[in-house]
Amino acid sequence: MREGAPALEVAGLGRRFGGFHALRGVSLRVERGERRAILGPNGAGKTTLFNLLSGELPPTEGAVFLFGEDVTRLSPHQRARRGLGRTYQTAHLFAELSVREHLFLAARGSRQRRTSLFSALTERPSWQRADEVAERVGLAAERGAPAAALSHGQQRQLEIGMALAGGPRQLLLDEPAAGLSQGERSTLLGLLSGLDPDITVLLIEHDMDIALEFASVVTILHEGQAVMTGSPEEVQSSEEVHALYLGAVRG
Ligand code: ADP
Ligand code: MG
């Protein structure tokens, strides 16, 4: 870790699938504690970008730096050990396991991987940690409930809890609000706004209102390229963005 380095730096990042460029020439710099939204239509390359950041896919070009360290060739586990946590676009839950059991396993897994470099929180017994996280993501009353008994919104809260159980310094959230009702969205937005301000958060979001409310900086991806990065106000008033994205989505 380099003192003063940004949380994330990506240089000329690209990924081809055969002859198809899912992502190309993406360069980003995300400061520590920043709230960054990644917006773009379906197929823009948002999830591919996250897969390259978390190490689930190797890039075909470019490099990824976490807190100043080149992690381009590191495995997902090695990146998690360096403080990267993520959620997935599709649910990764076990129907019969309880909220507490999910969080216990997520906390224990990260504890086994970690060293004393990390906060005292991760040193505590994992059941206690599981209960703390359940509380933090608004599932204290559902601790004993199996995942299958949770509402869709609560399942999303649990997935964020599982990512938090590892004590991440940087969190990647892939469309956590997709398919949620209006009420569930506002619960989720409350949860996201209450996250530890030291955690850097990248949020892929389809809902423009959530993205613009949550983020301090927005990056627009279009056909695999980062076409604009700016404040929510800059993005909203950009004609290019309207032509490329807002126009397409809002008709
Ligand atoms: P988004 O998350 O923005 O909707 P994705 O990153 O999932 O977009 O996908 C970007 C493009 O790359 C899409 O056209 C998709 O079909 C393609 N793609 C993604 N993953 C693969 C893969 N493993 N093999 C082939 N094509 C893929
Ligand atoms: Mg996606």
Image (spheres, helix red, strand yellow):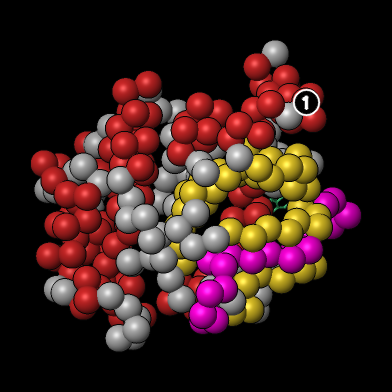
Task: Between residue 133 and residue 67, name the one nearer to us.
Answer: 67
Residue 149 falls left or right of residue 46:
left
Q: Does the magenta stretch include residue 57?
A: no
Residue 77 falls left or right of residue 6:
left
Residue 43: x percent and y percent?
Answer: 70, 39
Query: Where is 42 relative to 89, above or below?
Result: above
To which residue does mark 1 refer? 239
Residue 203 falls left or right of residue 93:
right
The structure residue drawn at horizontal position 32% and vertical position 56%, both measured from the top left corner, is 196
Q: Does the magenta stretch include residue 13?
A: yes
Quarter occupied by residue 31 = bottom right
Quarter occupied by residue 40 = top right
Evaluate whether residue 128 shows in this view.
Answer: yes
Question: Which amino acid type corresponds to the residue marked 1 in the rendered image?
Answer: Glu
The structure residue drawn at horizontal position 74% and vertical position 47%, both measured from the top left corner, is 226
Mark 1, Cα crowd under 10 Å, few <14 / some 14-19 / many 20+, is few
Q: Where does the magenta region start and end?
A: 1-21
Residue 177: x percent and y percent?
Answer: 44, 34
Farthest-out residue, bottom: 116
Farthest-out residue, right: 19
